[in-house]
Image (cartoon, rainbow, N blue to C red):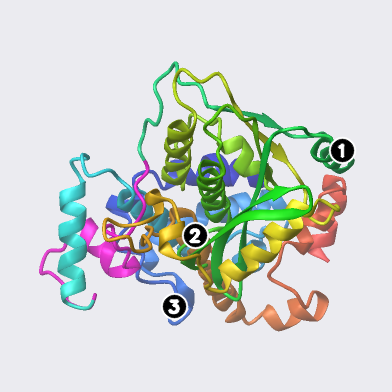
Amino acid sequence: MKRLYEGVIVPKMLYAMDIWCVGLISKGRGKKGGGRGARGFTLQLARVQRMATLQITGGLRSSPSDMLDAHANILPIQQIIRKNCHRATLRMATLLSTHPLVKGIKSAYLYCEKRNFKGRKRQPSPLHKLMNEFQIDPTKMEKIAPIRHYPKWEPDMETHIAKDVELAAIEDTTASEDLRVYSNGSMINGGVGGAAVAMRGEMIIGSKRFYWGSEKDHTVHEVEIVGMILAVQILKEKGGGVGRSMALGIDNQAAIKATTAFSSQPGHYLMDIFHDDLRQLIQTDDSRKLVIRWTLCHKGIAGNKVADVHVKRAARGESSPASELPKSLLTKQRELLTLPQSKLAIQQCFNKYIKEEANTVIASSPRITQLRSVDPSAPSPKFTKVINTLPRHHSSLLFQL
């Protein structure tokens, strides 16, 4: 029932909310009126959510709505509205420059930024209200193209993901490629960075590091791809373009699977850079393929150990000299490229913030003291996990108790 409500009812109920719902997004932060914003309209939406949470928890008809939300692990309706409006704004900020809405989106943001997101138009559009509230700069966001590859595109690599950790270690130790590189990405103390190393047996023959910036703007998945770009540059420098077989070891399965993906996802522009650099290394008439293997860390693989050391240095802000980095990560002035903000990172930060906001709203309930005497972690997913294995009748009795 919870999945049905969040996956079907909420999207239907809040369809096109970034147009008709923008009058509610600046309200509901747990200050006045229980965080309900425009009470008349929001209460109608809250009535639907109450019907769903009653079915989820099996509560009595007289159960208070805030306790139903807390036990069902569902955000209050005002926070659901804000979360969905933020997602729509973020989606608009990642549109390509050819989209007809881009000009209006940039104009609305610049108008709000010029007035420090405080000045209001006499008759503001929904875009102005969204930009005033969420302050997402479309000029600094990554752009997500609807189409990445033509239908007959084939990648210049082969991917191997072993069924278990032991097989992954065996495949790496028994491999016989001429050139072997390892890449990694990491997040340390709020910073993110990627690194790659080339190995000949137990000896390091090449290494590169790239510090990307703050974890608020980027994700580990993206720096994993940056490490792969650095690995291709090492292969170029070590003679990977003269008919020698090559292998790349990565400890992140998601990054490996993304190399053959057709769909457009956050960070795909980095994967496109990786493919372009690899195409320069392996020409069209070259039948070779780059072998990409899953090589898990902390399993005695020397290359992964060395890559892990270098990636920690990169995440702490230590990049290789610009002259040693690939041109795709540099500006025309041969300086480190300032990469755009990640849609996924911005969304993760806001989701964390909206949960804290919801906790503030629920904490203002007069019943929260009694609830926390039973469950100190409330509001949390603990109750939904407990009732997940219970029959409906038992879970209903547990909630009523």
Q: Where does the magenta region start and end?
A: 117-144
Q: Residue at x 87, y 49 (%)?
A: 390
- Mark 1 vs mark 3: which is more N-terminal? 3
Residue 112 shows up from this direction: yes
Determine which residue is flagged by label 3. Answer: 33
Main secondary-structure element of the magenta-colored stretch: loop
Name the image quarter holding residue 367.
bottom right
Name the image quarter holding residue 387.
bottom right
- Mark 1 vs mark 2: which is more N-terminal? 1
- Mark 2 vs mark 3: which is more N-terminal? 3
* Labels 1 & 2 near each other (Cβ < 8 A): no
211 in relation to 97, above or below: below
Which of labels 1 and 2 is toward the front? 1
Q: Nearer the viewer, residue 70 or 266?
A: 266
Which of labels 2 and 3 is toward the front? 2
Q: Is residue 56 magenta?
A: no
Determine which residue is flagged by label 2. Answer: 345
Dot 1: few (<14), some (14–19), or many (≥20) neighbours within 10 Å? Answer: few
- Quadrant location, the C terminus: bottom right
- What whole-number distance in Å separates the C-alpha atoms at marks 1 and 2? 35 Å
Element carrying mark 1: helix
Element carrying mark 3: helix
Q: Is residue 110 left or right of residue 92?
A: left
Q: Position of residue 220 (x, y in %)?
A: 58, 57
73 in relation to 358, above or below: above
Dot 3: few (<14), some (14–19), or many (≥20) neighbours within 10 Å? Answer: few
- What whole-number distance in Å separates the C-alpha atoms at marks 1 and 3? 62 Å
Specify the label residue 170 is tagged with.
1
Circle 3: residue type: Gly
